[in-house]
Amino acid sequence: MTSTADALSSPSSLAWARRRGSVARFWRSYRTHRTGLLGLGALAVIALVALAAPLLVGGDVQSVTNAPGSALDSPSGEFPLGTDQFGRSLLGLLIWGARISLTVGLMAAALSVAIGTLVGILAGHFGGWFSTVVMRITDWFLVMPTLVLAIVLATVMSRSVWTVILAIGVTSWPTTARLVRAQTLAVESRPYIERATALGGGHGHIMTRHVLPNVMPLVLAQTTLGISHAILTEATLAFLGLGDPDVVSWGGMLQDAREAGAVSSGHWWYLAPPGIAIALVALAFTLCGRTVESVLNPKLGVSTR
């Protein structure tokens, strides 16, 4: 009995219990927001379809040599969304393209938020001339158009999915950096930070054990909102012909439709599905992000119910 009680009262057990309680409180509050649940449900369905793409449509759907249909067939029973200029099923391409678009959006947003969080915490913690220099660099990135910088990087580097992820990630971090810096300054003004410093806590201890946990809610909300921006940016780069030509993405489908003359010839079924898919995923992530922001920071007064 004594050993069991000691195990339950150990610091690690108490920490995990607090984390589980925080997650449970977060979910109870999140599920009261109808729009957040709608966005989460839509994302769950899209993610499941993307993961099951090899089972649903197979890998041959991307092949231009074994296309089952003729070029630019209109929607029919065999091809519910029609075919592209190579005779490939647009429904299969749409399902397969979800894998690339979601992967790029998630990884680019994670990279962007990671850079922004690191820069923001360092600038807020050390202050002085270091903070001034870092924030001036951040301001320079902030005033420069993100899309233009991403286009430049995607142009000078090899055309691949990783290039697109890197181009989006390293150009869209300034907003996160400024938000995290402001939150870091607010956290470090609290009395327990002074006590931790007086007890010998170093810079690394203060930033990782005290500042980072307090800025994580902001980081989580910013990540959710950043994914929709990353997906739209990836679609734009692919539409401009700067994506990976060897993979199928929703932006790449729009680029192929433009090259095939779908706009001038009135082949709406080639343009509409990828465009609607991009809009729906961006909207779903935005709904989730606003709800997360509202739950984690009720003072914002964001109504998402």
Image (cartoon, grey):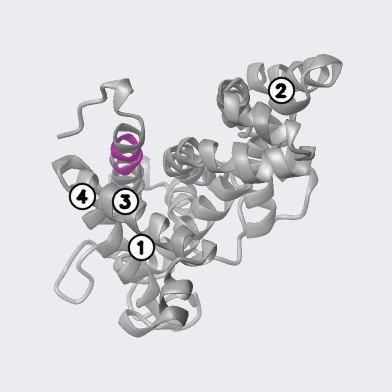
Residue 58 in the image: x percent, y percent? 39, 83
Q: CA distance from mark 3 to mark 4?
A: 29 Å
Contact (CB < 8 A) between labels 3 and 1? Answer: yes
Task: Give the residues drawn in magenta, as a range.
Answer: 288-292
Which three-letter amino acid code belongs to the residue tagged 1? Leu
Q: Secondary structure at mark 2?
A: helix
What's the mark number on residue 94? 1
Please give the residue where the numbered disc 4 appears in the rendered image: 28
Q: Earlier in the sequence, mark 1 or mark 4?
A: 4
Q: Secondary structure at mark 1?
A: helix
Helix, strand or loop: magenta stretch: helix
What's the mark number on residue 277? 3
Can residue 149 be seen here? no
Please give the residue where the numbered disc 2 appears in the rendered image: 138
Residue 293 in the image: x percent, y percent? 35, 34
Q: Quadrant of residue 206?
A: top right
Question: Local crowd at mark 2 within 10 Å, few (<14), some, or many (≥20)?
Answer: some
Contact (CB < 8 A) between labels 1 and 4? Answer: no
> Residue placed at 31% from the left, 43% from the top?
288
Which three-letter amino acid code belongs to the residue tagged 3? Ala
Contact (CB < 8 A) between labels 3 and 2? Answer: no
Which three-letter amino acid code belongs to the residue tagged 4? Arg
> Residue placed at 19% from the left, 77% from the top?
78
Which three-letter amino acid code belongs to the residue tagged 2? Thr
